Image (cartoon, rainbow, N blue to C red):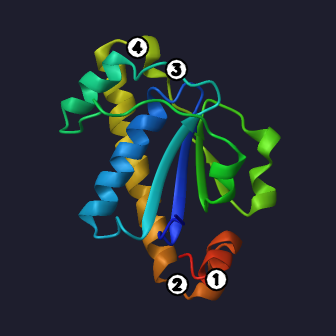
Amino acid sequence: MPNQAEVEVVFACVRNAGRSQMAAAFAERELDRRGLGGRVAVRSGGTRPADEIHEVVRQVMSEVGVDLSDASPGYVDLELLRDSEYLVTMGCTIAEFNPDSLGVDTREWDLTDPAEADPETARAVRDELEERVEGLVDEIEADLAEPVESRSLSARIRDSLGLG
């Protein structure tokens, strides 16, 4: 079944067990808060996914009301990127997929990996991610308000096929 969202954003890190999971959870929460949840799909993945979410990440996210108990790491792959308008990488390289050739707005967020971090460091990463995600959602919200002609190539193609 095709995705009905107008825009997709992908958060990627090496293990998909920390930063990208936190970012995706914050993005979903912020999009829902703004009433954009149905218009924007949020995905996350890793280049070498872990078996499970880091316990310290689950702990610090639960402190701010985000439950990651059902979350599990997954892969980032070409198909995932092909369908996205925004890609945020955190400590991984996905150059082999050449996201620029796909018309994906790519950005790198340089943040500490909370995998082996103490709770205080993990909280600092969490708080910075929440702030950055809110800024990204501001951009996405502004892009959604723009005429279709100025939106990314992949968004325009989905629109023309009736998939978005």
Give me the disc on residue 100.
none
Report crowding for label 2: few under 14, some 14 to 19, many 20 or more residues within 10 A (C-alpha).
few
Residue contact at pointers 1 and 4, CB within 8 angstroms: no
Q: Nearer the viewer, residue 124 or 150?
A: 150
Q: Nearer the viewer, mark 1 or mark 3?
A: 3
| Circle 2 SS class | loop
The mark nearer the N terminus, 2 or 4, is 4
The mark nearer the N terminus, 1 or 4, is 4
Q: CA distance from mark 1 to mark 3?
A: 38 Å
Question: Where is 34 relative to 120, above or below?
Answer: below
* Residue 28 percent coordinates (x, y): 35, 53
Q: Which of the 4 image quadrants contains residue 23?
A: top left
Which residue is most to the front? 1
Q: Mark 1 is on which residue type? A: Ser
Give me the disc on residue 50.
3
The mark nearer the N terminus, 1 or 3, is 3
* Residue 118 percent coordinates (x, y): 34, 12
| Circle 3 SS class | loop
Q: Nearer the viewer, residue 14 or 91?
A: 14
Residue that mark 2 sits on: 146
Residue contact at pointers 1 and 2, CB within 8 angstroms: yes
At x 27%, y 29%, the residue is 69
At x 62%, y 39%, the residue is 76
Q: Which of the 4 image quadrants contains residue 21?
A: top left
Residue that mark 4 sits on: 117
At x 48%, y 30%, the residue is 73
Q: Nearer the viewer, mark 4 or mark 3?
A: 3
Q: CA distance from mark 2 to mark 3?
A: 38 Å
